[in-house]
Structure formats: structure tokens, C-alpha cells
Image (tube, rainbow, N blue to C red):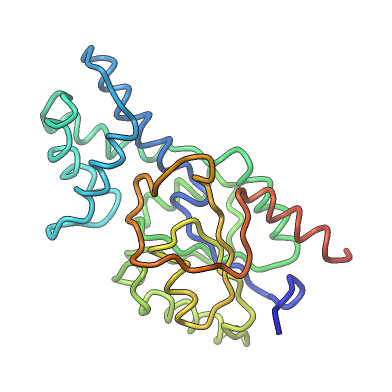
């Protein structure tokens, strides 16, 4: 029997790409460098190059890995090389902004659920993201805390252990994310109810996120966090 919003005690969230405008932040940061250098710039090309570079064998933790990534993609985009520009891209992450609907939606959802962040970003970056979002989280798990990245089941297992210590269970979790590869597919395999926030609904392809081997049909599907919060409020009596 399908679950309703009243069946959950927790909502777990991917952060970068779901709540924080990752593609807008990355493209905007690279575009600023291109503008200063006086070279043409294509945002979708940059995302495609980023995706390929991000998943090379020598990948490091995000966002420190942006220094390495810049060195890979800059020549292909005609951008100036050098450590200073690479470091500039990495440092710009602290100023990446939430999607316009994220902060309000999280504040509304926090009235009904315990919100837990699950991000492949490092702790230093998550602290900036959380502040930008209004610090709505009951708990936050980063790659520094877990020692691994989604879609590794071990990341999720640490969150399950935390919830169980509070007397909860994975059956009481709704996992909310935009990435089919990192979140929706693996959450289904682990028995979680999930909610796909399709941020790129008006665009083709997967942008800066790796394409999954197969598409997973989510339990809930919205194109924004605002739509999720609206649905929760409309279906639950205060």
C-alpha cells in the first residue's frame, strides 16, 4: 500500500543540485572568468565537460576537487589556466545560492518533519549551504562524516543508524533528491520511499549530474521543492 505524507517522521535531502543551485553556481562562476578573459562561453558545454572530469579515476572530494576539475576543463573551454583561477572556482562555492523555493519550502516542511541533509560535499561547504538555507536541518551528513559518497549504500546506512538511535526507522523516511544516479535509484534499492525533484524538467539531459544506467520511477515526483511543500500542506490537516 502506497504511503502518504502523514506516514513519515523524517525527510532526508540531497543538498547540492536539489536545494542549492549547483548548475547555476558552477556555470555562473565559470562564465565570470570567461567574461573577464573575453572568450565565448557555453553553459551546457561546460556542464558536459564538468561531468566527464568530475568522474575521472583520480576524483577527489567535492568541492576541493574543483581545483583539479578546472585544470581539466579550462583548456577545452578556452579559459585561462593557472592555480589562481582554479582556486577561485573552488572558493566561489561558498557563495552558491539556494534555488528560489528551497529556503521557504524547508521552513514549512520542518514544522512537520525532522530534516536530515545528506551531501557528497565536504563539511566546510555544507556549513555555508546550510546557513544560506536558514539552518533547517535536524542533522547533516557529509562526505567527511561518512567517508564515502552516494550512491554508496554505506552512506545511507549511517543515516539509518542515526535515525534508529532516535527510535525511528527507515520506513519513516522520505528521501528527497534530484539525482537519479546518486539518490533515487539507490534509495529504491534500500527500501526507502523517495521523492524526485526534477530540477531540469524544462531542459534536456542530465546536465552536470551523471546519467543513471536506468531510470527509476519515484514514489513522488515534483519539479520544485515548493511544489513538494504545497502538496504536504494540502494533504495533511494542520
Q: In which quarter of the image is the C terminus?
A: bottom right
Name the quadrant containing residue 23. Answer: top left
Q: Please report the residue visible at 36 percent of the width from the left and 56 percent of the height from the top.
A: 121
Q: Please report the residue visible at 59 percent of the width from the left and 75 percent of the height from the top.
A: 193
Horizontal arrangement in the rendering, residue 119 relative to residue 238 (left or right): left
Horizontal arrangement in the rendering, residue 142 relative to residue 164 (left or right): left
Figure label count: 0
Q: Nearer the viewer, residue 120 or 131?
A: 120
Name the quadrant containing residue 136. Answer: bottom right
Q: Quadrant of the N terminus?
A: bottom right
Q: Nearer the viewer, residue 197 or 211?
A: 211
Q: In this view, does 202 lie above or below 16?
A: above
Location of residue 80 in the rendering, given as x and y in whole percent from the top left corner:
14, 23
Name the quadrant containing residue 32. Answer: top left
- Single out the residue that lies furthest toward the top: 38
Q: Please report the residue visible at 23 percent of the width from the left and 41 percent of the height from the top.
A: 49
Horizontal arrangement in the rendering, residue 11 relative to residue 153 (left or right): right
Q: Please report the residue visible at 54 percent of the width from the left and 52 percent of the height from the top.
A: 198
Location of residue 223 in the rendering, given as x and y in whole percent from the top left corner:
60, 49
Location of residue 152 in the rendering, given as x and y in whole percent from the top left corner:
33, 74
Location of residue 205 in the rendering, given as x and y in whole percent from the top left corner:
39, 47
- Single out the residue that lies furthest toward the right: 237
Q: Is residue 229 above or below residue 171?
A: above
Amino acid at each position: 500500500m502506497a504511503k502518504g505524507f502523514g506516514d513519515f517522521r523524517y525527510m532526508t535531502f540531497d543538498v547540492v543540485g536539489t536545494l542549492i543551485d549547483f548548475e547555476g553556481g558552477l556555470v555562473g562562476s565559470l562564465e565570470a572568468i570567461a567574461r573577464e578573459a573575453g572568450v565565448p562561453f557555453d553553459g551546457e558545454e561546460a556542464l558536459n565537460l564538468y561531468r566527464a572530469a568530475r568522474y575521472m579515476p583520480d576524483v577527489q572530494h567535492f568541492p576541493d576537487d574543483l581545483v583539479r576539475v578546472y585544470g581539466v576543463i579550462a583548456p577545452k573551454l578556452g579559459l585561462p589556466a593557472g592555480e589562481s583561477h582554479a582556486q577561485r572556482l573552488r572558493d566561489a562555492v561558498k557563495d552558491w545560492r539556494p534555488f528560489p523555493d528551497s529556503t521557504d519550502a524547508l521552513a514549512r516542511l520542518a514544522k512537520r518533519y525532522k530534516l536530515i541533509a545528506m551531501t557528497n560535499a565536504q563539511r566546510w561547504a555544507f556549513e555555508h549551504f546550510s546557513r544560506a538555507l536558514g539552518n533547517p536541518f535536524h542533522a547533516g551528513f557529509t562526505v567527511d562524516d561518512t567517508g564515502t559518497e552516494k550512491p554508496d549504500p554505506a552512506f545511507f546506512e549511517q543515516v539509518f543508524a542515526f535515525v534508529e538511535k532516535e527510535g525511528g526507522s527507515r520506513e519513516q523516511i522520505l528521501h528527497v533528491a534530484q539525482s537519479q544516479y546518486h539518490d533515487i535509484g539507490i534509495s529504491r534499492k534500500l527500501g526507502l520511499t523517495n521523492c524526485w525533484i526534477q530540477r531540469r524538467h524544462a531542459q534536456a539531459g542530465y546536465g552536470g549530474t551523471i546519467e543513471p544506467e536506468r531510470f527509476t520511477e519515484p514514489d513522488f515526483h515534483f519539479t520544485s521543492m515548493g511544489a513538494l511543500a504545497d502538496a504536504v500542506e494540502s494533504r495533511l490537516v494542520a
